[in-house]
Image (spheres, rainbow, N blue to C red):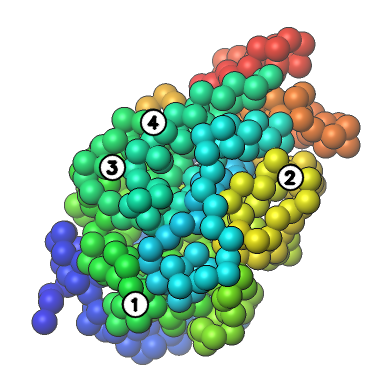
Amino acid sequence: MAVYDPGSLKADEFINHEEILATLEYADKNKDNIPLINEILEKARPVKKDRGCTCAGLSHREASVLLACEDPEIRKKIYKIAEEIKQAFYGNRIVLFAPLYLSNYCVNGCLYCPYHMKNGHIARKKLTQEEIRQEVIALQDMGHKRLAIEAGEDPVNNPIEYILDSIKTIYDVHHKNGDIRRVNVNIAATTVENYRKLKDAGIGTYILFQETYHKESYLKLHPTGPKHDYDYHTEAMDRAMEGGIDDVGLGVLFGLELYRYEFVGLLMHAEHLEAVHGVGPHTISVPRVRKADDIDPDVFDNGISDDTFAHITACIRLAVPYTGMIISTRESQSVRERVLRLGISQISGGSRTSVGGYTEEERPHDTEQFDVSDQRSLDEVVCWLMENNHIPSFCTACYREGRTGDRFMSLCKNGQILNCCHPNALMTLSEYLEDYASEKTKKFGYGMIDRELKKIPNEKTRGIAEEHIRDIRNSNRRDFRF
């Protein structure tokens, strides 16, 4: 029997089944222990320092007690602290991105994904480099600066060389005032050598969802293909970091297995990365199973309600206060609106989950990976964010200035967000307003920028930001950053 060890490099030891079961038992035993819960909440609360705030975060056991607690007053406290943490470290900024599906060829047999190899009626498609170029131009014309590229696992159709060529193509497209400044990559687990190649290609974050941390369920859900290897998949982030990628993104697909089990596994994975590499995940995503080509989400009997989804989001925010959190267009506008204040820091906008499709006026459905719940345009999403007092940000400055991994975490922990990320967000928003926004969004946006500039505490930084925004409005100068 494997023994729990967060510092181990073996999947069964840092994601240990017996430790998860013991944690769930501990949470059930203490879910009504109000004195203990109040101690945990007090530990999670942000503490103001001379420069910004600090947060202790929570262990997977502590956070699991909060997740198990059903007391409505305690939940209100959890949500309030989640909002405080979100505001302390990320402010009211929301970073925007779009997925770009390169290929749906796949050799795996995943039961929850329409790209699985046995799906004989889905249209198989792989973008050529010229098609990628046209997709990128369409995305730039929308206003996007950050992409997450996606591809099925197929060593013949989607080898690492294809991914590398695609990244180069994306970065090489300069259209009008448009540039893709950060390419995040969501592809199957691979070798240290290939992760080094991705690092050398200039990727931002390497993203890989675990899908489920329950090993027995994982093996059943991935009956065939290389993804069937639970250990190789679960240990991928360690190989990515060994290959020099210090920004990695975790996630589970809620609905495949019992959510409390997944929650513990997710936090244990974050603790493992911190223990071994000195820095936790750059992002955590919280997708839920959605309907797709031949996928019925009701087949999986572990679906969660919107209330539970919000509770999970808030508890993750308390546990890992410095980690970015992502929600996609899998979720509806109303759900996204609810969880933005509870910890989400990145969302997709104007997304299409088909292979290609951004160049087409009508949304294609024949190659979609999942049904998109929020089908609004990027401009509608940008305007909606501002109406809810969130700053839409297209910033990629930290990645391009080398502030990744522990350097980004240090910036976040030292409370320098308002002097760095906040002005960067306002400058990139100004770019969007000048180059892509509707008149309504533009008018609303400059009103927000005028208000938000006053919140920059450093007078010199504020003055430089104001000057750069004037340059953006009065010339074609772009890409200012702190």
Residue position marked by numbered label 4 in the rendering = 202
Neighbour tally class for label 1: few under 14, some 14-19, many 20 plus, Cα within 10 Å: some
In three-dimensional space, the C-alpha distance between marks 1 and 3, rounded to whole angstroms, equals 26 Å
- In this view, the residue in front, 178 or 80, is 178
Q: Mark 1 falls on what kind of element? A: loop
Q: Earlier in the sequence, mark 2 or mark 1?
A: 1
Q: Quadrant of residue 425?
A: top right
In the picture, measured across the screen, residue 223 lies left or right of residue 137, that is left
In the picture, measured across the screen, residue 388 lies left or right of residue 125, that is right
Mark 1 or 3: the one toward you: 1
Mark number for residue 195? 3
**Considering only vertical position in the picture, is 481 above or below 307?**
above
Q: Amino acid at mark 2?
A: Glu
Q: Amino acid at mark 4?
A: Gly
Could you tell me if the residues under marks 3 and 2 are in contact, i.e. CB atoms within 8 Å? no
Q: Earlier in the sequence, mark 4 or mark 2?
A: 4
Residue at screen point 44% across, 29% down: 168
Residue position marked by numbered label 1 in the rendering = 223
Residue at screen point 59% across, 80% down: 296
Mark number for residue 360? 2
